[in-house]
Image (tube, rainbow, N blue to C red):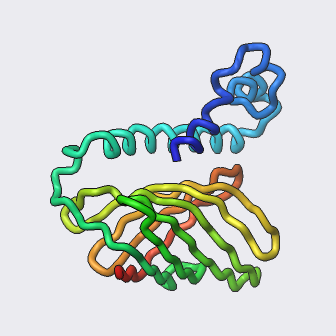
């Protein structure tokens, strides 16, 4: 996940000449704001704000074990998730690789466009529970049956009791975040 954040922020640290020549760097984007629409600039600001907040919140959680003063949770080997409350219908599987790192796969069926989407990636389950919530965060890539490769994404979620909730934020302009809520079975 840190690699994804680094690759996204890396163009910000180029020389001034490279920034002026590059079309995708933030500095060149700001200098040419008259050519770009206001919505594009707002989208870039939202992404930078989101990434900054994630870095600020995740790094202390990964480095300081005393950050969450809850009881230490025992990480299960597998999770099976079912979400049909919020469209699209989703089934997911998380398999523990080692420690609290999980490989994850999700299938979304979108009836409106008759498309099946596959999301694959990795998530880190934080080792402490906060009241009844177990938090996790990670990222991955999404593929579509109709379009093939679509985009990389970041995900943040929580497991509580036998339920789960997730937010999937695509790292592409013009894409809205997806939300999931449903049942989570540990085994």
- Residue 168 x/y as whole percent: 54, 61
* Quarter of the rendering occupied by the C terminus: bottom left
Mark yes or no: residue 136 visible. Answer: no
Residue at 45% of width from left, 64% of height from top? 97
Quarter of the figure with residue 56: top left
The number of numbered badges drawn on the structure is 0
62 is higher (above) or lower (below) than 170: above
- Residue 43 x/y as whole percent: 64, 44
- Residue 121 x/y as whole percent: 57, 61
Q: Nearer the viewer, residue 154 or 87?
A: 154
Quarter of the figure with residue 58: top left
Residue at 39% of width from left, 80% of height from top? 184
Q: Nearer the viewer, residue 30 or 143?
A: 143
Q: Is residue 173 left or right of residue 90?
A: right
Q: Nearer the viewer, residue 98 or 18?
A: 98
Q: Is residue 66 left or right of residue 7?
A: left
Residue lying furthest front in this view? 98
- Residue 73 x/y as whole percent: 23, 64
Residue at 70% of width from left, 79% of height from top? 116
13 is higher (above) or lower (below) than 141: above
């Amino acid at each position: 996940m840190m690699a994804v954040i680094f690759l996204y922020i890396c163009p910000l640290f180029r020389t001034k000449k490279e920034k002026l020549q590059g079309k995708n760097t933030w500095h060149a984007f700001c200098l040419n704001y008259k050519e770009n629409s206001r919505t594009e600039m707002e989208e870039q600001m939202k992404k930078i704000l989101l990434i900054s907040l994630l870095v600020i919140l995740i790094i202390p959680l990964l480095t300081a074990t005393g950050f969450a003063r809850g009881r230490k949770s025992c990480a299960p080997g597998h999770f099976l998730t079912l979400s049909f409350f919020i469209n699209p219908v989703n089934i997911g599987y998380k398999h523990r690789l080692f420690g609290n790192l999980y490989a994850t796969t999700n299938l979304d069926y979108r009836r409106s466009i008759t498309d099946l989407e596959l999301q694959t990636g990795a998530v880190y389950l934080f080792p402490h529970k906060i009241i009844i919530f177990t938090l996790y965060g990670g990222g991955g890539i999404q593929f579509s049956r109709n379009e093939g490769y679509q985009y990389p994404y970041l995900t943040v979620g929580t497991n509580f009791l036998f339920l789960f909730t997730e937010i999937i934020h695509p790292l592409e302009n013009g894409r809205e975040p997806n939300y999931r809520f449903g049942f989570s079975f540990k085994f």
